[in-house]
Image (spheres, grey):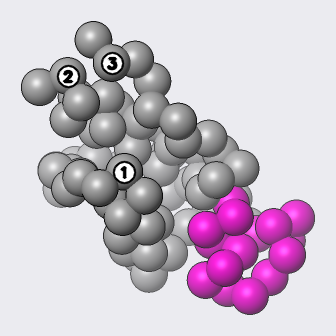
C-alpha cells in the first residue's frame, strides 16, 4: 500500500489561484466545472497518472475540500491497484 499522495488543500488552492489570477487568499471555496476540469488536468500532470473519476464522483465535487478528498482517493487507488 502506497499511502496518501502528497497532495494538500494548499496545493489545490494554489492551482486555482493560477487559473483565476487571484491571490490564494481570495480563492473561493466553491468550484465550478471549469475550475474542476483545470484541477483534474493539473493533478493528472503532477502525478503523471490519469484520474479515473466516475460521473458520481465528479458530481459530488462542489468545494476545494470535496476535490481534495476525491483526488486523494483516486490517486491512492491508482497507486495501489
Whole-number angstrom distance, CA of label 3 to CA of label 1: 13 Å
Q: Which residues are magenta?
A: 13-27
Whichever of callouts 1 and 2 sits on the residue coming sooner in the sequence is 1
Relative to residue 55, is residue 2 drawn left or right? Answer: right
Whichever of callouts 2 and 3 sits on the residue coming sooner in the sequence is 3
Q: Quadrant of the C terminus?
A: top left
Q: Name the disc covering residue 80, or none.
A: 2
Q: Is residue 68 magenta?
A: no
Q: Position of residue 74 (x, y in %)?
A: 28, 38
Residue 3 visible somewhere in the drawing: yes
Looking at the picture, tell me which residue is in the foreground, 6 or 24.
Answer: 6
Relative to residue 50, is residue 43 drawn left or right? Answer: right
Q: In the rendered view, would you say 53 is above or below 14?
A: above
Q: Secondary structure beneath disc 2?
A: helix
Query: What residue lies at 62% left-to-right and 41% top-to-bottom?
Result: 8
Q: Secondary structure beneath disc 3?
A: loop
For disc 2, the neighbor class at 10 Å (few under 14, some 14 to 19, many from 20) is few
Q: Quadrant of the N terminus?
A: top left
For disc 3, the neighbor class at 10 Å (few under 14, some 14 to 19, many from 20) is few
Which residue carries the number 1 mark? 47
Q: Name the disc covering residue 2, or none.
A: 3
Amino acid at each position: 500500500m502506497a499511502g496518501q499522495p502528497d497532495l494538500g488543500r494548499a496545493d489545490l488552492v494554489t492551482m486555482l489561484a493560477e487559473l483565476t489570477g487571484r491571490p490564494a487568499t481570495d480563492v473561493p471555496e466553491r468550484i465550478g466545472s471549469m475550475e474542476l476540469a483545470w484541477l483534474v488536468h493539473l493533478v493528472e500532470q503532477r502525478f503523471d497518472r490519469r484520474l479515473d473519476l466516475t460521473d458520481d464522483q465528479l458530481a459530488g465535487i462542489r468545494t476545494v475540500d470535496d476535490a481534495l478528498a476525491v483526488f486523494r482517493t483516486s490517486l491512492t487507488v491508482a497507486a495501489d491497484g
